[in-house]
Amino acid sequence: MTNQRKVVLFIATSLDGYIATENDSLDWLFKVEGEGDNGYSEFYDTVDTVIMGRRTYDWVMEQEMESFPYEGKECYVFSRTVSQENENVQFFSRDVVDFTNQLKNKEGKNIWVMGGGDLLHSFIKNKLVDEMIVTVSPVIIGKGIPLFKEMDFETGLTLKSINRFNQFAELHYEVKR
Ligand SMILES: NC(=O)c1ccc[n+]([C@@H]2O[C@H](COP(=O)([O-])OP(=O)(O)OC[C@H]3O[C@@H](n4cnc5c(N)ncnc54)[C@H](OP(=O)(O)O)[C@@H]3O)[C@@H](O)[C@H]2O)c1
């Protein structure tokens, strides 16, 4: 059985396509009135592996938490500058294509690409993302860290579903091959 697991982006964005302010604040997101956990636990149950960029990992570790939020999942952090391993995560600088194909060829649940935009760019450029679940927050923040960086090619998507969580709109796409 090969390439059965999917690589899925699950991320929140402002209406103008930013995932954080320039100084990494998500206050604009957390103040929106959603519904329940806005589909998070349903999605979280579908993955057993989490991949993130080093800046997103730093952001996660700066939050006040009782425990690591992705405990029990295989967690990988991509970085070209930091190399370490701890009880929660493994750092990787390897080629994302090799790495992801190896992961996809193992048995398991889906693989969550958390972002941020920089790591996601490598995944999209190399056509590694199978599905995108993007939750749009009803705010225009004007500037910040973009969800999608500039690219010189198109990525076609098929809309699978739309869910509303009060003020959030969740758009679920499949990436066209
Ligand atoms: N709204 C949301 O749902 C959401 C979700 C995720 C993140 N965020 C926010 O997004 C921000 C971070 O996003 P970002 O785009 O600035 O950074 P990022 O993608 O999280 O991390 C960028 C770093 O990842 C490493 N990296 C990226 N591509 C790589 C590759 N191909 N190979 C090896 N290493 C690679 C590099 O680390 P080194 O510099 O160490 O080499 C790079 O500096 C944070 O504020 C976070 O809170 C928001």
Image (cartoon, rainbow, N blue to C red):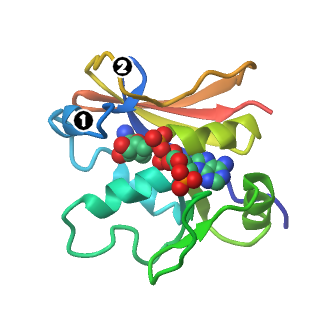
Answer whether residue 7 is visible to the viewer in this image.
no
Element at badge 2?
loop
Q: Foreground: 35 or 125?
A: 125
Point out residue 111 in the picture as x, y percentages from the top left corner.
60, 59
**Which residue is depicted at the point 67% across and 41% down?**
122
Q: Position of residue 77 (x, y in %)?
A: 54, 62
Mark 2 Cα within 10 Å, few/some/many (few <14, many 20+)?
some
Relative depth, front residue between 107 and 160? 107
Residue 31 percent coordinates (x, y): 14, 36
**Amino acid, disc 2:** Leu
Is 86 located above or below residue 58 in the figure?
Answer: below
Residue 91 falls left or right of residue 54: right
Residue carrying label 2: 15
Dot label at residue 29: 1
Q: Are marks 2 and 1 in contact (CB under 8 Å)?
A: no
Number of numbered labels in the structure image: 2
Say whether residue 57 is left or right of residue 30: right
Q: Is mark 1 within 8 Å of ligand 1?
A: yes
